[in-house]
Image (cartoon, coloured by chain):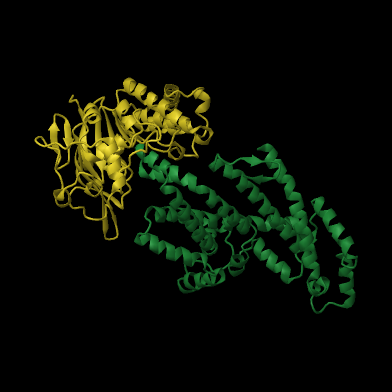
Amino acid sequence: MSNELLKVENLEVQFKSGSTVTKAVNGVSFTLNRKENIGIVGESGSGKSVTATSLLRLIPSPPGHISGGKILFEGKDLLTLSDKEMRDIRGNDISMIFQDPLTSLNPVFTVGDQIMESIKLHQKVSKKEAKQKAIQMLQLVGIPAPEKRLNMYPHEFSGGMRQRVMIAIALSCNPKLLIADEPTTALDVTVQAQILELMKKLQDEFNTSIIMITHDLGVVWEICHKVLVMYAGNVIEYGTVEEIHDHPMHPYTWGLLDSQITENIEDHEMLTTIPGSPPDLRQEIKGCPFAPRCSYTQDICFSKAPEMVEVKEKHFVACHFQTKENRLNRKERSTHVRAVVKS
Amino acid sequence: MGKYILGRILNMIPTLLIVAVIIFLITRMLPGNPAAVMLGPQASAEEIEVLTEKLGLNEPLYIQFFDYIGNLLQGNLGNSLTYNMPIIDLIMERFPNTVILAVSALLIAILVGVPAGIIAARKQNSIFDYAFTTFSLMGVSMPIFWLGIMLVLFFSVNLGWFPATGMGSMDEGIGDFISHLILPSIALATIPTAQFARITRSSMLEVISQDYVKTARSKGLHEFFVICKHAFKNALTPLLTVLGLQISSMLGGAVLTETIFSWPGIGLLIIDAIGKRDFVVVQNMVIFIALIYVVVNLLVDISYKLVNPRIKYSSGKGGTK
């Protein structure tokens, strides 16, 4: 059995509305091995969620449409599968949890029904066995009195508890891959940590790989092995967590890191922001998509799109000035701030 | 829940009492002496006087009212003079006919309207959706008396496929029974079909983009179950409200449809009784219809809980929240 679980090659996703085409994902490629976690980071609208949803072919179509690329899961291209074959994979080999646990559970069915539904669908077991398995899953995700909770409705659970239920549903068929679309964003800070802890614990138990979509880099350092930094539908930096954490190279990644709250920030010091906003994806982008907001730009950035280059082993960057031969000098955090304030 | 239902049942009493007062006053306000109208133009003054006395119409209004309420509370609906039979028997004879027509029209409305609404929501902004919007708008605004007459003209008079009026008998075979039922059912079903379809479409559109629908898809469920189980159950509440109103109004006698097709239901009975000034029948039929409305409404309110577990009933004010 090959160690490679998922290989995404040049994935392109477009949304069409009338005559305008929005290129939400523009040639994303990455690989994920078994028991490995990858974090997809980027600001809102960078194409993280669309990428993840496309992996299960769940983008609303129309208007969405996967216009190119390959999604090889255990060697099979998911884009060539029939609807029936795809349904057999969803919830069984690949499952997904969403950002807002308050809206992702169906309010009119009991929690037990919703967990048993996927078990009955994929594992062809009796109702009794499915119920046993559902109780076991609720126990695993740390919900007390699972037999009683099984017959309760989602509105009788707190946000954190609902996310635990979502995790129970997602893991109920021992999936090989779990896609978590900002699973902690909508939760209280204290609950966030518990949910992450739970995901880590269950990953060891189920040997599941995780694709973690987040804009919280802290989450990435905590549980991921690889990081994919996305900007305007493009991957701009990709590598191991150690590499990206210790030697980030793309100016956008620097900006993301600088805008985090860290221990080194002094009292009353202003947090860094990346000036401007992401480009309109309905327009053709010439050159580097980050150029208008980058403080290192030169003429070439506006005329030619940078290629993805492997600058070090397992570290890819798409920037004209970060290559094997050349390096950019990262400005000091404070000078960067000053530069931003001046501009 | 039990407390809530009991409260609601007790609440019905004042409602029905108010209806009784109003209908009593209205029937007494009709011009002309009912006894004279009942007996016809050839009746002598003496005959009219005898009948007036027999009906208690010579008593003061308040005595008449208390007699009427007293009888009502004892379940004694009295006799119809024009039909020459107890009113309770009259209802028992006519009501099943109305039920047959109502049930078949409701079946058509649900089986056509609801799926059409679901498909239109699934294929929003498609050609089907546009055609759907046009037809459903036509449906809700169709005058039933006109549609009924057109159906009779086309299918009975021109094509000769179905009988124009009357109700078939099971003794003549099921074919005869059904062929009499088809045209009135279609006429009666037109407005509810369009209404159900429009309500279904709009409430499905609201739920179809919800996260839990995406969750259902991500579990690997077939699109049919995603839509018809996960989305539809959430879209049911507004549909139930409209369904309840339609059931009540159909069971209360589809006056227009029953008149056009001479369907011997309670709608036709009321029209006949008004024409004959048989105010005893009119009074009691109105109370009976009011009873149907309150009972169906209660059933609908209870059924909300079945489709939406978030609804809590509070017995105190007799309302839902």
The quadrant of the image that shows the C terminus of chain B is top right
Q: Residue furthest left?
A: A325
Residue A66 in the figure: left or right of residue B159: left
Residue A244 in the figure: left or right of residue A100: left
Place of residue A240 in the rendered image (x, y in percent of width and height, measured from the top left): 22, 29
Place of residue A146 in the rendered image (x, y in percent of width and height, measured from the top left): 49, 24
Residue B21 in the figure: left or right of residue A270: right
* Residue plotted at (41% across, 46% down): B227
Q: Relative to the observer, which residue lies in front, B292 or B217?
A: B217
Chain coloured green in the rendered structure: B
Q: Relative to the observer, which residue lies in front, B196 or A237?
A: A237
Q: On screen, B86 above or below A32?
A: below
Answer with the quarter of the image where residue B69 lies.
Answer: bottom right
Q: Relative to the observer, which residue lies in front, A184 or A81?
A: A184
Q: On screen, B7 above or below A17?
A: above
Place of residue A164 in the rendered image (x, y in percent of width and height, measured from the top left): 43, 29
Whether residue A46 can be seen here: no
* Residue plotted at (78% across, 55% down): B17
Answer with the quarter of the image where residue A326 lies.
Answer: top left
Instruction: Find chain A in the image and tell me its colour.
Output: yellow
The quadrant of the image that shows the N terminus of chain B is top right
Whether residue B78 can be seen here: yes
